[in-house]
Structures are given as C-alpha cells and as structure tokens.
Image (tube, rainbow, N blue to C red):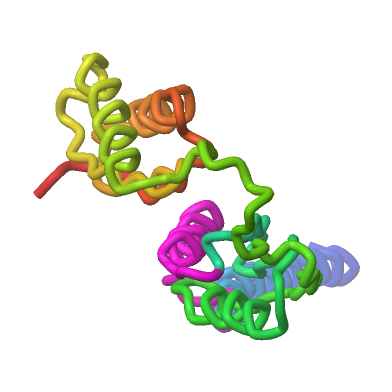
Amino acid sequence: MHRSGWITVALLVASVLAAACNSAYSDKDTVDSRTTTPAGETAVATSGTLPERLALDDSAVTSRIQAKFFLDPAIKERRIDVDTQSGIVTLRGDVASDNERAQALLLARTTDGVERVEDALTVNPAIDAPAPDAAAPSDAPVPSSADDEALTSRVQASFAEDALLETATLTVTAKDGVVLLDGIAPTAAAKQRAIAAARTTDGVIQVIDRITVGRAR
C-alpha cells in the first residue's frame, strides 16, 4: 500500500476513536445527570413539604365554635356568624357589650384548628333584652326545660323513622330552639340526612353540627 493510503487509514481510525470517546463521555454525563439531579430535586421537595395539618377541617372548626357559643350563657343569646377559611375564623354579628365581644373572641381563639380570628363583631347595647315590665303580655311564651325536652324527643323521633340513620349513634341536645347534634354517622349521606331532619323538625331554630363520619367503636 502506498504511503498516502496508510495516512488515510490512520486518519479514519483516529476519527472513529475520537467519536467513541465523545460518545462515552456523553453517556457518562447523561447517567450522572440522571442519578444526581433527582436527589437534589428530592431534597428540595422534601424541605418544602409541610407536615400533615393536624387541625380539623373548616366545617368542623366552625361547628366546634358554634357549640361553644351555644353552651355559653351570654353568647348563646347572640346571633354570631362563624366563617372559617383555611383555619382563619371570621366572626360577624352583634353583641351587647365589649365583655361579650371579648368572650366570643376568646372562645373562638381557644378552639382546636383555629389559626387566627378576625373580629368583625359590632357592639350594640340596644340588643340586650329589656327587663320584663307591665307592658309585656302575660301570656307570652317562655321557653322551659319541658319545651327543650319535647323538642329533643321530636328530633330523636325523626331520626328513628329514617332507615339511613339506624346504625348512627347520635346525641340530641335542645335549648331554646337551638339543637346540638353530636355523635357518629356511618356515612356522609347519613350525616346530612340527620342535619336535614333536625332542621325540618317543628320548633327548631338553628342546628349545630358536631357529627363525625365513621364507625362507632
């Protein structure tokens, strides 16, 4: 073979070797990027992931606050709207004094799942019930414990007539037309059925829901 032919062959061999080396380094870079990048991404994702929130969901937070208001002798007389969004509670309505406002805010702030309480309450002394006088009709209806017991019985009777609530373990407490529902319903549908049955019971003004969905232990 002529000298020029050997030179040509040598150049071809060198080109092939160079291409192989480039391919090897390229493959190595690809492998490295696939093995190292996800680790970094995983570390970032882990650091940005918050622990599971232990607070109750918003509807449960609202129900718990309403239940506290219901049990407070002063606050239960007021119509306070409770709105919860992502743990932030807003209270709206009228109270008769600064003391009542402070009590409502305290009850809300000390409730499980509350992150912050926004105060949109208005102090209106005029809403405080006036002392009874001679002008008041003598036959005006006065709520009594007997009325509360009768209302409780009517709500319980409506539950007993509903097959969907047969396995539910619910407690009914009535006070001046306000009904507190507590206990366990087997399904979300059963819970909604119980709330609807209570709301449509004669004499019920408001329903406070503290029912949880699950199986009774």
Confirm whether the magenta stretch covers residue 167: no
Residue at x 42%, y 71% (from the top left corner): 54
In the image, taking residue 55 as reference, residue 159 lies left or right, namely left
Confirm whether the magenta stretch covers residue 68: yes
Q: Is residue 161 above or below residue 57?
A: above
Q: Is residue 26 visible?
A: yes
Front residue of this view, candidates 47 and 128: 128
Residue at x 52%, y 77% (from the top left corner): 107
Front residue of this view, candidates 96 and 184: 96
Q: Is residue 120 visible?
A: no
Q: From this viewpoint, which residue is outermost toward the left?
A: 217
Residue at x 83%, y 70% (from the top left corner): 11
Q: Position of residue 151 (x, y in %)?
A: 33, 34
Q: Position of residue 178 (x, y in %)?
A: 46, 45
Residue at x 23%, y 40% (from the top left corner): 170
Q: From this viewpoint, which residue is outermost toward the front?
A: 134
Our reading of the magenta stretch's main secondary structure is helix
Q: Quadrant of residue 90?
A: bottom right
Q: Position of residue 29 (x, y in %)?
A: 66, 75
Q: Quadrant of residue 97?
A: bottom right
- Region in magenta: 45-74
Q: Position of residue 12 (x, y in %)?
A: 79, 64
Q: In which quadrant will I find the N terminus?
A: bottom right
In the image, taking residue 59 as reference, residue 29 lies left or right, namely right
